[in-house]
Image (tube, grey):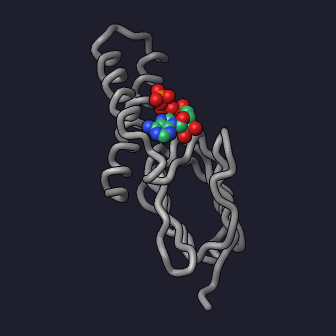
Amino acid sequence: MAKTFYLEIIATDRVFFKGDTEHLVITAVDGLLGILPGHEPLVTSLPTGELKYMVNGKWRYAAISEGFIQIMPDKAVILADSCELPEEIDIKRAEEARERAEEQMRQKQSIREYYETQAALNRAINRLKISQKHFK
Ligand code: ATP
């Protein structure tokens, strides 16, 4: 049997996943990071992106919005603003969110509004990308 470690993925509004995984791959700030059992302890922030984790030899994929990950040799905990499976993503809603954000980017905004709009645009584009890639 493959070696595993315990993974918790907690989004703001739900516990997305709790269980054993053989392998986790996240998009970290400086690129892809693969985590296997026995990984050295690490805490890092997670930008909006894709994650995948293997359960019983099969990859599961998810769209994640900004958060943090704590890695220990036998456990990893992800706290994120939101997390969706590809098949949970409402494409129309994400397209509308992208259009709204693109329209706001054309308007004059404060620096803070600009960063918020940029983050909303990233979330929408990420959802569309992951839904197109993994849910056909
Ligand atoms: P919107 O403007 O459409 O609300 P958003 O990026 O501001 O998008 P979030 O604040 O990231 O939304 O998420 C709020 C909740 O809605 C979370 O539970 C998230 O999983 C869910 N969610 C957001 N957009 C989608 C989508 N396109 N499909 C499915 N769930 C979504």
Residue 70 in view = no
Q: Foreground: 69 or 64?
A: 64
Q: Is residue 18 shown above or below 95?
A: below
Measured as percent of width and height from the top left, residue 16 is found at 63, 53
Query: Residue at left 30%, top 17%?
Result: 103
Q: Residue 32 or 15: which is nearer the viewer?
A: 15
Q: Quadrant of residue 70?
A: bottom right
Q: How many marks?
A: 0
Quadrant of the drawing holding the N terminus: bottom right
**Would you say 81 lies left or right of 106 here?**
right
Can you give x and y, in whole percent of width and height, for residue 5 in the image?
A: 67, 74
Q: Is residue 102 left or right of residue 83?
A: left
Q: Which quarter of the figure is the C terminus placed in?
A: bottom left
Q: List x then y, in percent, for residue 69.
A: 62, 54
In the displayed structure, 107 sits above or below 15; it is above
The residue at the point 61 percent across, 73 percent down is 21
Would residue 131 be seen by someone viewing this image from the given angle?
yes
* Left or right: residue 7 compared with residue 89: right
Q: Name which residue lies at 56% across and 74% down.
A: 55
